[in-house]
Image (cartoon, helix red, strand yellow):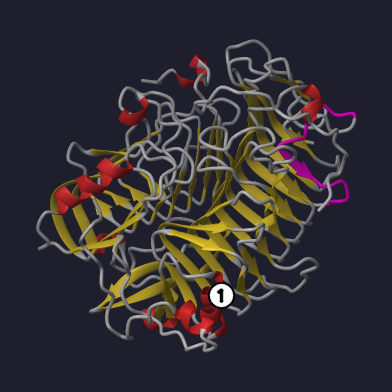
Amino acid sequence: MTSDSPSAQPPADGPRAAVRRRAVLGAAAAVPVLAALTTTASAAQTAPTAPAAPDAAKKRGKQSRLQAGGDLGPNVIVFDPSTPGIQAKLDEVFARQEADQFGPGRYQFFFKPGTYHGLNAQLGFYTSISGLGLSPDDTTINGDVTVDAGWFDGNATQNFWRSAENLALVPVNGTNRWAVAQAAPFRRMHIRGGLNLAPAGYGWASGGYIADSRIDGVVGPYSQQQWYTRDSSVGGWTNAVWNMVFSGVEGAPAQSFPEPPYTTLARTPISREKPFLYLDGAGYRVFLPALRRDARGVTWGNGTPRGTSLPLDRFYVAKPGDSAATLNQALGQGLNLLLTPGIYHIDQPIRVNRAGTVVLGLGYATLIPDNGATALQVADVDGVRLAGFLVDAGPVNSRTLVEIGPNGASRDHSADPITVQDVFIRIGGAGPGKATTSMVINARHTIVDHTWIWRADHGEGVGWETNRCDYGVVVNGHDVLATGLFVEHFNKYDVQWNGERGRTIFFQNEKAYDAPNQAAIQNGSIKGYAAYKVGDRVTTHEGWGMGSYCYYNVNPTIVQHHGFAAPNRPGVRFHHLLVVSLSGNGQYECVINDTGAPTSGTNTVPSKVVSYP
Protein backbone atom coordinates (compact mmCIF):
# COMPACT_ATOMS: atom_id res chain seq x y z
CA MET A 1 0.00 0.00 0.00
CA THR A 2 1.43 3.34 -0.98
CA SER A 3 0.36 6.79 0.02
CA ASP A 4 -0.74 9.42 -2.44
CA SER A 5 2.08 11.73 -1.43
CA PRO A 6 5.59 11.08 -0.14
CA SER A 7 6.28 12.08 3.41
CA ALA A 8 9.41 13.50 4.91
CA GLN A 9 10.93 11.05 7.37
CA PRO A 10 10.04 12.24 10.86
CA PRO A 11 12.83 12.51 13.39
CA ALA A 12 12.82 10.19 16.36
CA ASP A 13 10.71 11.60 19.14
CA GLY A 14 12.36 12.75 22.30
CA PRO A 15 11.28 12.26 25.90
CA ARG A 16 7.61 12.83 26.34
CA ALA A 17 5.47 13.23 29.39
CA ALA A 18 2.64 10.78 29.80
CA VAL A 19 -0.50 12.05 28.09
CA ARG A 20 -3.86 11.74 29.74
CA ARG A 21 -6.32 11.33 26.90
CA ARG A 22 -8.12 14.56 26.02
CA ALA A 23 -6.99 16.06 29.31
CA VAL A 24 -7.94 19.51 28.11
CA LEU A 25 -10.69 18.89 25.60
CA GLY A 26 -11.79 22.45 25.64
CA ALA A 27 -14.14 23.77 28.23
CA ALA A 28 -16.52 25.24 25.66
CA ALA A 29 -17.24 21.83 24.21
CA ALA A 30 -17.50 20.05 27.52
CA VAL A 31 -19.61 22.46 29.55
CA PRO A 32 -22.70 20.43 30.36
CA VAL A 33 -25.90 21.45 28.72
CA LEU A 34 -27.38 20.88 32.00
CA ALA A 35 -8.59 -13.54 43.01
CA ALA A 36 -9.69 -15.97 40.00
CA LEU A 37 -13.40 -16.29 39.57
CA THR A 38 -14.82 -19.62 40.52
CA THR A 39 -18.11 -19.56 38.60
CA THR A 40 -17.71 -21.38 35.29
CA ALA A 41 -20.22 -21.42 32.47
CA SER A 42 -20.98 -24.77 30.91
CA ALA A 43 -22.42 -25.02 27.45
CA ALA A 44 -25.09 -27.54 26.62
CA GLN A 45 -23.37 -30.87 26.21
CA THR A 46 -24.17 -31.26 22.55
CA ALA A 47 -20.53 -32.22 22.06
CA PRO A 48 -17.67 -33.25 24.35
CA THR A 49 -15.28 -30.66 25.65
CA ALA A 50 -12.45 -30.02 23.23
CA PRO A 51 -9.38 -32.13 24.07
CA ALA A 52 -6.59 -30.53 26.01
CA ALA A 53 -3.34 -29.44 24.41
CA PRO A 54 -4.00 -30.21 20.71
CA ASP A 55 -0.67 -28.60 19.87
CA ALA A 56 1.17 -31.17 21.98
CA ALA A 57 -0.33 -33.95 19.86
CA LYS A 58 0.94 -32.28 16.72
CA LYS A 59 4.44 -32.08 18.18
CA ARG A 60 4.32 -35.86 18.54
CA GLY A 61 3.60 -36.11 14.83
CA LYS A 62 -0.16 -36.53 15.17
CA GLN A 63 -2.98 -34.13 14.43
CA SER A 64 -6.06 -35.31 16.25
CA ARG A 65 -9.38 -34.02 15.00
CA LEU A 66 -10.56 -31.12 17.11
CA GLN A 67 -13.89 -31.46 18.85
CA ALA A 68 -16.44 -28.69 18.90
CA GLY A 69 -18.72 -27.24 21.53
CA GLY A 70 -18.00 -27.73 25.18
CA ASP A 71 -17.29 -25.56 28.18
CA LEU A 72 -17.05 -21.78 27.79
CA GLY A 73 -14.27 -21.36 30.32
CA PRO A 74 -13.80 -19.67 33.69
CA ASN A 75 -14.25 -16.06 32.53
CA VAL A 76 -17.71 -16.61 31.05
CA ILE A 77 -20.04 -16.22 34.02
CA VAL A 78 -23.64 -17.32 33.57
CA PHE A 79 -26.49 -16.38 35.91
CA ASP A 80 -30.10 -17.47 36.16
CA PRO A 81 -32.72 -15.81 38.36
CA SER A 82 -32.08 -18.33 41.15
CA THR A 83 -28.29 -17.86 41.25
CA PRO A 84 -27.19 -16.66 44.69
CA GLY A 85 -24.78 -13.75 45.08
CA ILE A 86 -25.19 -12.19 41.64
CA GLN A 87 -24.52 -8.65 42.85
CA ALA A 88 -21.43 -9.76 44.78
CA LYS A 89 -19.99 -11.40 41.66
CA LEU A 90 -20.71 -8.33 39.54
CA ASP A 91 -19.01 -6.16 42.16
CA GLU A 92 -16.02 -8.49 42.39
CA VAL A 93 -15.29 -8.23 38.69
CA PHE A 94 -15.89 -4.47 38.65
CA ALA A 95 -13.39 -3.98 41.48
CA ARG A 96 -10.77 -5.67 39.31
CA GLN A 97 -11.66 -4.00 36.04
CA GLU A 98 -12.81 -0.49 36.95
CA ALA A 99 -9.42 1.15 36.35
CA ASP A 100 -7.44 -1.69 34.75
CA GLN A 101 -7.26 -0.03 31.36
CA PHE A 102 -4.44 -2.10 29.90
CA GLY A 103 -4.56 -5.19 32.10
CA PRO A 104 -5.10 -8.84 31.09
CA GLY A 105 -8.56 -9.38 32.64
CA ARG A 106 -11.35 -10.31 30.20
CA TYR A 107 -14.91 -11.16 31.34
CA GLN A 108 -18.29 -12.04 29.84
CA PHE A 109 -21.48 -12.03 31.93
CA PHE A 110 -24.51 -13.89 30.57
CA PHE A 111 -28.01 -13.73 32.07
CA LYS A 112 -30.36 -16.58 31.23
CA PRO A 113 -33.91 -15.59 30.26
CA GLY A 114 -36.04 -14.54 33.21
CA THR A 115 -36.50 -11.59 35.54
CA TYR A 116 -33.83 -10.26 37.91
CA HIS A 117 -34.34 -7.74 40.70
CA GLY A 118 -32.28 -5.12 42.49
CA LEU A 119 -29.08 -5.34 40.46
CA ASN A 120 -26.57 -2.68 39.43
CA ALA A 121 -24.03 -4.14 37.03
CA GLN A 122 -21.18 -1.62 36.92
CA LEU A 123 -18.96 -2.37 33.96
CA GLY A 124 -15.22 -1.77 33.91
CA PHE A 125 -12.69 -2.45 31.18
CA TYR A 126 -12.98 -5.57 28.99
CA THR A 127 -16.32 -6.56 30.48
CA SER A 128 -19.37 -7.55 28.45
CA ILE A 129 -22.88 -8.18 29.74
CA SER A 130 -25.53 -9.94 27.64
CA GLY A 131 -28.88 -11.67 27.83
CA LEU A 132 -29.33 -15.19 26.52
CA GLY A 133 -32.77 -14.83 24.97
CA LEU A 134 -33.71 -14.40 21.32
CA SER A 135 -35.21 -11.03 22.26
CA PRO A 136 -33.98 -8.46 24.78
CA ASP A 137 -37.35 -8.69 26.48
CA ASP A 138 -36.70 -12.36 27.31
CA THR A 139 -34.22 -11.18 29.98
CA THR A 140 -35.32 -8.32 32.20
CA ILE A 141 -33.21 -6.68 34.90
CA ASN A 142 -35.09 -4.49 37.31
CA GLY A 143 -32.00 -2.41 37.93
CA ASP A 144 -29.17 -0.84 36.00
CA VAL A 145 -26.18 -1.55 33.80
CA THR A 146 -23.92 1.36 34.69
CA VAL A 147 -20.84 3.00 33.25
CA ASP A 148 -19.58 6.07 35.11
CA ALA A 149 -16.20 7.75 35.46
CA GLY A 150 -15.40 7.94 39.16
CA TRP A 151 -12.11 6.14 38.55
CA PHE A 152 -10.97 9.06 36.32
CA ASP A 153 -12.27 12.01 38.34
CA GLY A 154 -15.51 12.27 36.41
CA ASN A 155 -13.86 12.29 32.97
CA ALA A 156 -15.48 9.63 30.74
CA THR A 157 -13.19 10.05 27.73
CA GLN A 158 -11.26 6.87 28.57
CA ASN A 159 -14.20 4.57 29.26
CA PHE A 160 -13.25 2.18 26.45
CA TRP A 161 -13.71 -1.56 25.78
CA ARG A 162 -16.94 -2.67 27.43
CA SER A 163 -20.35 -3.63 26.05
CA ALA A 164 -24.01 -4.35 26.80
CA GLU A 165 -26.26 -6.48 24.60
CA ASN A 166 -29.63 -8.19 24.42
CA LEU A 167 -31.15 -7.13 27.75
CA ALA A 168 -34.22 -5.24 28.93
CA LEU A 169 -33.59 -2.82 31.77
CA VAL A 170 -36.01 -1.13 34.13
CA PRO A 171 -33.73 1.51 35.70
CA VAL A 172 -34.14 2.07 39.43
CA ASN A 173 -34.50 5.85 39.17
CA GLY A 174 -36.02 5.80 35.67
CA THR A 175 -32.79 6.53 33.77
CA ASN A 176 -29.82 4.26 33.10
CA ARG A 177 -26.32 5.80 32.93
CA TRP A 178 -24.06 4.68 30.06
CA ALA A 179 -21.17 7.17 30.03
CA VAL A 180 -18.79 5.52 27.61
CA ALA A 181 -16.12 6.48 25.11
CA GLN A 182 -15.02 4.45 22.07
CA ALA A 183 -15.24 0.66 21.59
CA ALA A 184 -18.22 0.39 23.96
CA PRO A 185 -21.21 -0.80 21.91
CA PHE A 186 -24.76 -0.75 23.23
CA ARG A 187 -26.59 -3.29 21.05
CA ARG A 188 -30.02 -4.88 21.08
CA MET A 189 -31.03 -3.25 24.35
CA HIS A 190 -34.47 -2.25 25.58
CA ILE A 191 -34.44 0.54 28.16
CA ARG A 192 -37.84 0.92 29.80
CA GLY A 193 -36.99 4.43 30.84
CA GLY A 194 -34.39 7.00 29.86
CA LEU A 195 -30.69 6.77 28.99
CA ASN A 196 -28.02 9.21 30.23
CA LEU A 197 -24.81 9.12 28.21
CA ALA A 198 -22.84 11.50 30.44
CA PRO A 199 -20.93 10.80 33.66
CA ALA A 200 -22.13 11.99 37.05
CA GLY A 201 -21.21 15.64 37.24
CA TYR A 202 -21.49 15.89 33.45
CA GLY A 203 -17.75 15.79 32.85
CA TRP A 204 -16.17 15.24 29.46
CA ALA A 205 -17.29 12.31 27.35
CA SER A 206 -16.35 11.04 23.89
CA GLY A 207 -18.50 8.17 22.60
CA GLY A 208 -20.25 6.33 21.26
CA TYR A 209 -22.52 3.79 19.50
CA ILE A 210 -26.05 2.41 19.84
CA ALA A 211 -27.67 -0.11 17.46
CA ASP A 212 -30.84 -2.21 17.29
CA SER A 213 -32.04 -0.76 20.59
CA ARG A 214 -35.24 0.73 21.93
CA ILE A 215 -35.11 3.48 24.55
CA ASP A 216 -38.66 4.18 25.67
CA GLY A 217 -37.72 7.44 27.35
CA VAL A 218 -35.39 10.27 26.39
CA VAL A 219 -31.70 9.88 25.55
CA GLY A 220 -29.55 12.60 27.12
CA PRO A 221 -26.05 12.84 25.67
CA TYR A 222 -25.36 16.10 27.54
CA SER A 223 -21.52 16.45 27.45
CA GLN A 224 -20.92 13.73 24.82
CA GLN A 225 -18.93 15.26 21.97
CA GLN A 226 -20.30 12.94 19.31
CA TRP A 227 -22.49 9.84 18.97
CA TYR A 228 -23.84 7.47 16.31
CA THR A 229 -27.18 5.66 16.64
CA ARG A 230 -28.31 3.13 14.04
CA ASP A 231 -31.57 1.26 13.38
CA SER A 232 -33.14 1.95 16.75
CA SER A 233 -36.07 3.71 18.42
CA VAL A 234 -35.81 6.56 20.93
CA GLY A 235 -38.42 8.46 22.90
CA GLY A 236 -36.51 11.72 22.48
CA TRP A 237 -33.01 13.23 22.33
CA THR A 238 -32.03 16.23 24.44
CA ASN A 239 -29.08 17.95 22.78
CA ALA A 240 -25.99 17.86 20.58
CA VAL A 241 -22.44 19.11 21.16
CA TRP A 242 -20.40 18.58 17.95
CA ASN A 243 -21.69 15.69 15.87
CA MET A 244 -24.78 13.57 16.52
CA VAL A 245 -25.62 11.15 13.70
CA PHE A 246 -28.67 8.91 13.23
CA SER A 247 -29.57 6.44 10.53
CA GLY A 248 -32.75 4.37 10.56
CA VAL A 249 -33.76 5.68 14.01
CA GLU A 250 -37.42 6.11 14.90
CA GLY A 251 -37.88 9.22 17.02
CA ALA A 252 -34.55 10.79 16.00
CA PRO A 253 -34.38 14.58 15.93
CA ALA A 254 -34.88 16.24 12.58
CA GLN A 255 -31.81 17.00 10.54
CA SER A 256 -30.52 20.46 11.43
CA PHE A 257 -26.74 20.56 10.93
CA PRO A 258 -24.89 22.87 11.50
CA GLU A 259 -26.96 24.11 14.49
CA PRO A 260 -27.80 22.00 16.30
CA PRO A 261 -25.41 19.51 14.69
CA TYR A 262 -27.85 16.68 13.96
CA THR A 263 -27.33 14.51 10.87
CA THR A 264 -30.39 12.32 10.35
CA LEU A 265 -30.82 9.70 7.65
CA ALA A 266 -34.28 8.14 7.56
CA ARG A 267 -32.85 4.69 6.77
CA THR A 268 -29.59 2.78 6.82
CA PRO A 269 -28.87 1.59 3.27
CA ILE A 270 -27.63 -1.88 4.28
CA SER A 271 -27.25 -3.43 7.70
CA ARG A 272 -26.93 -6.82 9.34
CA GLU A 273 -26.88 -7.09 13.10
CA LYS A 274 -24.05 -8.70 15.02
CA PRO A 275 -24.24 -12.47 15.75
CA PHE A 276 -25.05 -13.36 19.35
CA LEU A 277 -25.15 -16.36 21.66
CA TYR A 278 -28.51 -17.47 23.03
CA LEU A 279 -30.13 -20.42 24.82
CA ASP A 280 -32.48 -22.72 22.94
CA GLY A 281 -33.85 -24.94 25.69
CA ALA A 282 -30.77 -26.29 27.42
CA GLY A 283 -28.40 -25.75 24.52
CA TYR A 284 -26.42 -22.77 23.28
CA ARG A 285 -26.81 -21.54 19.74
CA VAL A 286 -25.46 -18.54 17.82
CA PHE A 287 -28.07 -16.43 16.06
CA LEU A 288 -27.11 -14.92 12.70
CA PRO A 289 -29.40 -11.95 11.92
CA ALA A 290 -30.57 -11.49 8.34
CA LEU A 291 -29.37 -8.75 6.00
CA ARG A 292 -31.64 -5.71 5.81
CA ARG A 293 -31.83 -3.04 3.14
CA ASP A 294 -33.17 0.45 3.79
CA ALA A 295 -33.36 -0.52 7.45
CA ARG A 296 -35.25 1.40 10.09
CA GLY A 297 -36.03 0.51 13.68
CA VAL A 298 -35.14 -2.61 15.67
CA THR A 299 -35.03 -6.19 14.36
CA TRP A 300 -36.84 -7.69 17.37
CA GLY A 301 -40.17 -7.30 19.15
CA ASN A 302 -42.51 -8.68 16.49
CA GLY A 303 -42.13 -12.42 16.75
CA THR A 304 -39.01 -14.41 15.98
CA PRO A 305 -36.30 -12.20 14.47
CA ARG A 306 -35.30 -12.85 10.88
CA GLY A 307 -32.17 -14.89 10.46
CA THR A 308 -30.69 -18.34 11.00
CA SER A 309 -28.82 -20.01 13.83
CA LEU A 310 -26.03 -22.49 14.43
CA PRO A 311 -25.64 -24.89 17.36
CA LEU A 312 -22.56 -24.62 19.53
CA ASP A 313 -21.27 -27.91 18.14
CA ARG A 314 -20.62 -26.06 14.88
CA PHE A 315 -18.05 -23.92 16.73
CA TYR A 316 -14.59 -24.59 18.04
CA VAL A 317 -14.71 -23.04 21.50
CA ALA A 318 -11.26 -21.48 21.72
CA LYS A 319 -9.43 -20.88 24.98
CA PRO A 320 -6.45 -18.64 25.74
CA GLY A 321 -3.36 -20.67 24.97
CA ASP A 322 -4.76 -22.08 21.73
CA SER A 323 -2.29 -21.40 18.94
CA ALA A 324 -3.01 -20.00 15.49
CA ALA A 325 -2.29 -23.49 14.13
CA THR A 326 -5.07 -24.92 16.29
CA LEU A 327 -7.52 -22.19 15.30
CA ASN A 328 -6.68 -22.74 11.64
CA GLN A 329 -7.10 -26.48 12.05
CA ALA A 330 -10.59 -25.86 13.43
CA LEU A 331 -11.42 -23.60 10.51
CA GLY A 332 -10.05 -26.23 8.13
CA GLN A 333 -12.44 -28.77 9.66
CA GLY A 334 -15.33 -26.50 8.69
CA LEU A 335 -15.92 -25.18 12.20
CA ASN A 336 -16.62 -21.61 13.19
CA LEU A 337 -14.68 -19.94 16.03
CA LEU A 338 -15.99 -18.82 19.40
CA LEU A 339 -13.16 -16.95 21.13
CA THR A 340 -13.71 -17.11 24.90
CA PRO A 341 -12.37 -14.25 27.03
CA GLY A 342 -8.61 -13.95 27.32
CA ILE A 343 -5.45 -13.12 25.39
CA TYR A 344 -4.32 -15.21 22.42
CA HIS A 345 -0.75 -14.96 21.10
CA ILE A 346 -0.61 -16.01 17.47
CA ASP A 347 2.45 -16.55 15.28
CA GLN A 348 0.64 -16.79 11.94
CA PRO A 349 -2.58 -15.37 10.52
CA ILE A 350 -5.93 -16.86 11.42
CA ARG A 351 -7.09 -17.73 7.90
CA VAL A 352 -10.81 -17.56 7.22
CA ASN A 353 -11.26 -19.23 3.82
CA ARG A 354 -14.75 -20.73 3.95
CA ALA A 355 -17.85 -18.75 2.96
CA GLY A 356 -20.22 -18.10 5.83
CA THR A 357 -17.65 -18.58 8.59
CA VAL A 358 -18.39 -16.89 11.92
CA VAL A 359 -15.61 -15.66 14.21
CA LEU A 360 -17.28 -14.39 17.38
CA GLY A 361 -15.45 -13.11 20.44
CA LEU A 362 -16.74 -12.95 24.01
CA GLY A 363 -15.55 -10.54 26.67
CA TYR A 364 -13.09 -8.69 24.43
CA ALA A 365 -11.04 -11.76 23.52
CA THR A 366 -7.74 -10.32 22.30
CA LEU A 367 -5.43 -11.46 19.50
CA ILE A 368 -1.77 -10.43 19.70
CA PRO A 369 0.27 -11.24 16.57
CA ASP A 370 3.86 -12.23 17.37
CA ASN A 371 6.91 -11.84 15.14
CA GLY A 372 5.24 -9.40 12.75
CA ALA A 373 2.40 -11.71 11.71
CA THR A 374 -0.95 -10.52 10.38
CA ALA A 375 -3.59 -11.40 12.97
CA LEU A 376 -6.44 -12.36 10.67
CA GLN A 377 -6.99 -12.77 6.93
CA VAL A 378 -10.31 -13.33 5.17
CA ALA A 379 -10.53 -14.84 1.68
CA ASP A 380 -12.64 -13.38 -1.13
CA VAL A 381 -15.76 -15.33 -0.07
CA ASP A 382 -19.36 -14.57 0.83
CA GLY A 383 -20.93 -14.07 4.19
CA VAL A 384 -18.05 -14.13 6.66
CA ARG A 385 -19.00 -12.54 9.98
CA LEU A 386 -16.29 -11.17 12.27
CA ALA A 387 -17.51 -9.77 15.58
CA GLY A 388 -16.58 -8.90 19.12
CA PHE A 389 -12.81 -9.09 19.53
CA LEU A 390 -9.74 -6.90 19.92
CA VAL A 391 -6.50 -7.07 17.93
CA ASP A 392 -3.48 -5.70 19.82
CA ALA A 393 -0.33 -5.08 17.75
CA GLY A 394 2.81 -6.88 18.86
CA PRO A 395 6.27 -5.35 19.32
CA VAL A 396 7.52 -6.54 15.91
CA ASN A 397 6.05 -4.52 13.05
CA SER A 398 3.16 -6.21 11.23
CA ARG A 399 2.60 -5.16 7.62
CA THR A 400 -1.13 -5.39 8.31
CA LEU A 401 -3.14 -6.51 11.33
CA VAL A 402 -6.47 -7.42 9.70
CA GLU A 403 -6.99 -8.12 5.98
CA ILE A 404 -10.52 -8.41 4.60
CA GLY A 405 -10.05 -10.07 1.22
CA PRO A 406 -6.74 -10.58 -0.57
CA ASN A 407 -5.11 -7.96 -2.74
CA GLY A 408 -7.05 -7.76 -6.01
CA ALA A 409 -10.27 -9.25 -4.58
CA SER A 410 -13.08 -8.65 -7.06
CA ARG A 411 -15.99 -11.04 -6.40
CA ASP A 412 -19.50 -9.64 -6.03
CA HIS A 413 -20.67 -10.11 -2.42
CA SER A 414 -23.72 -7.85 -2.59
CA ALA A 415 -26.18 -10.67 -1.75
CA ASP A 416 -24.17 -11.88 1.26
CA PRO A 417 -21.50 -9.39 2.32
CA ILE A 418 -18.65 -9.83 4.76
CA THR A 419 -19.46 -8.00 8.00
CA VAL A 420 -16.93 -6.63 10.50
CA GLN A 421 -18.65 -5.59 13.75
CA ASP A 422 -17.16 -4.52 17.07
CA VAL A 423 -13.72 -5.57 15.84
CA PHE A 424 -11.29 -3.19 17.50
CA ILE A 425 -7.58 -2.63 16.82
CA ARG A 426 -5.00 -1.09 19.13
CA ILE A 427 -1.36 -0.16 18.52
CA GLY A 428 0.48 0.51 21.78
CA GLY A 429 -0.97 1.34 25.19
CA ALA A 430 -0.73 -2.14 26.67
CA GLY A 431 2.94 -2.20 25.61
CA PRO A 432 5.02 -1.50 22.52
CA GLY A 433 3.18 -2.30 19.31
CA LYS A 434 3.84 -1.53 15.66
CA ALA A 435 2.18 -2.01 12.31
CA THR A 436 2.25 -0.35 8.92
CA THR A 437 -1.51 -0.57 8.29
CA SER A 438 -4.11 -1.62 10.84
CA MET A 439 -6.94 -2.81 8.59
CA VAL A 440 -7.04 -3.33 4.83
CA ILE A 441 -10.40 -3.97 3.13
CA ASN A 442 -10.05 -5.44 -0.33
CA ALA A 443 -13.30 -7.42 -0.56
CA ARG A 444 -16.22 -5.75 -2.32
CA HIS A 445 -19.46 -4.94 -0.46
CA THR A 446 -17.87 -5.33 2.98
CA ILE A 447 -19.87 -3.74 5.82
CA VAL A 448 -17.82 -2.31 8.67
CA ASP A 449 -20.34 -1.71 11.44
CA HIS A 450 -18.69 -0.04 14.41
CA THR A 451 -14.97 -0.20 14.86
CA TRP A 452 -12.40 1.79 16.83
CA ILE A 453 -8.95 1.60 15.33
CA TRP A 454 -6.59 3.37 17.71
CA ARG A 455 -2.92 4.18 17.79
CA ALA A 456 -2.52 4.79 21.51
CA ASP A 457 -1.86 8.28 22.83
CA HIS A 458 -1.31 7.09 26.42
CA GLY A 459 -0.29 3.98 28.31
CA GLU A 460 2.89 1.93 27.84
CA GLY A 461 4.92 1.84 24.65
CA VAL A 462 3.72 5.17 23.31
CA GLY A 463 5.72 7.61 21.19
CA TRP A 464 5.88 8.94 17.63
CA GLU A 465 8.17 6.09 16.57
CA THR A 466 7.65 3.72 19.53
CA ASN A 467 4.14 2.67 18.43
CA ARG A 468 4.35 3.83 14.85
CA CYS A 469 1.54 2.91 12.49
CA ASP A 470 1.21 4.95 9.31
CA TYR A 471 -2.31 4.02 8.22
CA GLY A 472 -5.46 3.18 10.16
CA VAL A 473 -7.86 1.85 7.51
CA VAL A 474 -7.14 1.39 3.81
CA VAL A 475 -10.16 0.54 1.64
CA ASN A 476 -9.34 -0.82 -1.80
CA GLY A 477 -12.57 -2.77 -2.39
CA HIS A 478 -15.54 -1.28 -4.18
CA ASP A 479 -19.01 -0.77 -2.68
CA VAL A 480 -17.82 -0.83 0.94
CA LEU A 481 -20.07 0.69 3.62
CA ALA A 482 -18.85 1.92 7.03
CA THR A 483 -21.41 2.70 9.73
CA GLY A 484 -19.76 4.04 12.86
CA LEU A 485 -16.11 4.49 11.89
CA PHE A 486 -13.80 5.63 14.70
CA VAL A 487 -10.11 5.90 13.67
CA GLU A 488 -7.51 7.89 15.61
CA HIS A 489 -3.90 9.06 15.89
CA PHE A 490 -2.11 7.47 12.92
CA ASN A 491 1.21 8.77 11.69
CA LYS A 492 -0.08 9.40 8.16
CA TYR A 493 -3.62 8.87 6.81
CA ASP A 494 -6.13 7.64 9.36
CA VAL A 495 -8.42 6.50 6.55
CA GLN A 496 -7.37 6.12 2.91
CA TRP A 497 -10.27 5.13 0.66
CA ASN A 498 -9.32 3.98 -2.83
CA GLY A 499 -12.38 1.89 -3.76
CA GLU A 500 -15.32 3.13 -5.78
CA ARG A 501 -18.82 3.79 -4.45
CA GLY A 502 -17.71 3.82 -0.84
CA ARG A 503 -20.00 5.24 1.84
CA THR A 504 -19.40 6.28 5.44
CA ILE A 505 -22.13 7.16 7.90
CA PHE A 506 -20.45 8.78 10.92
CA PHE A 507 -16.70 9.23 11.26
CA GLN A 508 -14.82 10.31 14.40
CA ASN A 509 -11.13 11.07 14.39
CA GLU A 510 -8.32 12.69 16.28
CA LYS A 511 -5.00 13.31 14.60
CA ALA A 512 -1.90 11.98 16.36
CA TYR A 513 -1.13 13.98 19.49
CA ASP A 514 2.57 13.29 19.53
CA ALA A 515 3.97 14.67 16.27
CA PRO A 516 7.24 16.32 17.31
CA ASN A 517 7.21 19.09 14.70
CA GLN A 518 5.71 20.28 11.42
CA ALA A 519 8.22 18.34 9.33
CA ALA A 520 7.15 15.06 10.92
CA ILE A 521 3.64 15.30 9.47
CA GLN A 522 4.46 17.04 6.19
CA ASN A 523 2.78 15.37 3.18
CA GLY A 524 4.83 16.70 0.30
CA SER A 525 3.67 20.29 -0.13
CA ILE A 526 0.62 19.75 2.09
CA LYS A 527 0.65 20.49 5.80
CA GLY A 528 -0.28 17.16 7.33
CA TYR A 529 -2.04 14.04 6.17
CA ALA A 530 -5.82 14.26 6.04
CA ALA A 531 -7.76 12.22 8.58
CA TYR A 532 -9.93 10.89 5.74
CA LYS A 533 -8.46 10.73 2.25
CA VAL A 534 -10.43 9.67 -0.82
CA GLY A 535 -8.09 8.47 -3.58
CA ASP A 536 -7.41 10.81 -6.48
CA ARG A 537 -8.89 8.41 -9.06
CA VAL A 538 -12.16 7.76 -7.21
CA THR A 539 -15.24 9.00 -9.07
CA THR A 540 -18.03 8.12 -6.61
CA HIS A 541 -17.98 8.37 -2.83
CA GLU A 542 -20.27 9.75 -0.12
CA GLY A 543 -20.01 10.54 3.58
CA TRP A 544 -22.32 11.88 6.28
CA GLY A 545 -21.62 13.30 9.75
CA MET A 546 -17.83 13.31 9.91
CA GLY A 547 -15.45 15.04 12.31
CA SER A 548 -11.69 15.36 12.78
CA TYR A 549 -10.00 16.94 15.81
CA CYS A 550 -6.39 17.93 16.45
CA TYR A 551 -4.59 18.03 19.77
CA TYR A 552 -0.91 18.50 18.97
CA ASN A 553 0.10 18.83 22.60
CA VAL A 554 3.79 17.96 22.04
CA ASN A 555 4.08 20.87 19.61
CA PRO A 556 1.01 23.15 19.63
CA THR A 557 2.42 25.25 16.77
CA ILE A 558 1.72 22.50 14.22
CA VAL A 559 -0.72 23.41 11.45
CA GLN A 560 -2.90 20.83 9.70
CA HIS A 561 -4.08 22.02 6.29
CA HIS A 562 -7.37 20.07 6.32
CA GLY A 563 -9.18 17.19 7.96
CA PHE A 564 -10.59 15.76 4.72
CA ALA A 565 -9.17 15.41 1.22
CA ALA A 566 -11.03 14.18 -1.85
CA PRO A 567 -11.22 14.66 -5.62
CA ASN A 568 -13.36 17.60 -6.61
CA ARG A 569 -15.93 15.67 -8.68
CA PRO A 570 -19.74 15.71 -8.70
CA GLY A 571 -19.87 12.04 -7.67
CA VAL A 572 -17.70 12.59 -4.58
CA ARG A 573 -19.98 14.15 -1.98
CA PHE A 574 -19.83 14.93 1.71
CA HIS A 575 -22.53 16.11 4.09
CA HIS A 576 -21.92 17.70 7.48
CA LEU A 577 -18.18 17.91 8.09
CA LEU A 578 -16.35 19.57 10.95
CA VAL A 579 -12.84 20.06 12.28
CA VAL A 580 -11.95 21.10 15.83
CA SER A 581 -8.74 22.35 17.46
CA LEU A 582 -8.81 21.09 21.04
CA SER A 583 -7.87 24.07 23.21
CA GLY A 584 -5.65 25.53 20.50
CA ASN A 585 -3.16 22.63 20.41
CA GLY A 586 -2.52 22.91 16.68
CA GLN A 587 -4.90 24.38 14.12
CA TYR A 588 -6.64 23.48 10.86
CA GLU A 589 -6.44 25.82 7.88
CA CYS A 590 -9.49 24.29 6.13
CA VAL A 591 -12.11 21.59 6.61
CA ILE A 592 -11.99 19.71 3.27
CA ASN A 593 -9.47 20.35 0.52
CA ASP A 594 -9.24 24.16 0.44
CA THR A 595 -12.80 24.73 1.66
CA GLY A 596 -13.98 25.75 5.11
CA ALA A 597 -12.90 28.36 7.62
CA PRO A 598 -9.75 27.85 9.68
CA THR A 599 -9.89 27.05 13.35
CA SER A 600 -8.32 29.55 15.72
CA GLY A 601 -7.76 30.37 19.35
CA THR A 602 -8.20 28.12 22.37
CA ASN A 603 -11.99 28.02 22.66
CA THR A 604 -12.49 24.66 20.90
CA VAL A 605 -15.08 25.93 18.42
CA PRO A 606 -15.69 23.68 15.39
CA SER A 607 -15.33 24.85 11.83
CA LYS A 608 -18.08 23.28 9.71
CA VAL A 609 -18.95 22.58 6.10
CA VAL A 610 -22.58 21.66 5.42
CA SER A 611 -22.01 20.09 2.00
CA TYR A 612 -19.17 19.49 -0.43
CA PRO A 613 -18.74 20.21 -3.24
Q: Reply above or below: 523 against 284.
A: above
Residue found at the very far top of the displayed protein:
601
Q: Quadrant of residue 168?
A: bottom left
User: What segment is highlighted magenta in the picture?
Assistant: 525-539
- Left/right of residue 216 with respect to residue 207 in the rendered view: left
Which quadrant, please, contains the C terminus? Answer: top right
- The x and y percentages for residue 40 are 24, 66
How many marks the image carries: the answer is: 1
**256 or 60, which lies in front?**
60
- Left/right of residue 9 with respect to residue 66 in the rendered view: right
Asked if the magenta segment contains residue 528, the reply would be: yes
**14 or 233, which lies in front?**
14
Asked if the magenta segment contains residue 24, the reply would be: no
* Secondary structure character of the magenta stretch overall: loop
Q: Quadrant of residue 224?
A: top left
Residue occupied by mark 1: 325
Residue found at the very far front of the displayed protein:
60
Graded by Cα atoms within 10 Å as few (under 14), some (14 to 19) or many (20 or more), the crowding at tag 1 reads some
- Left/right of residue 195 with respect to residue 91 in the rendered view: right
Q: Reply above or below: 104 against 242.
A: below
Residue shown at 48% from the left, 29% from the top: 240
Q: Reply above or below: 194 against 56.
A: above
Amino acid marked by disc 1: Ala
**SS of the residue at dot 1?**
helix
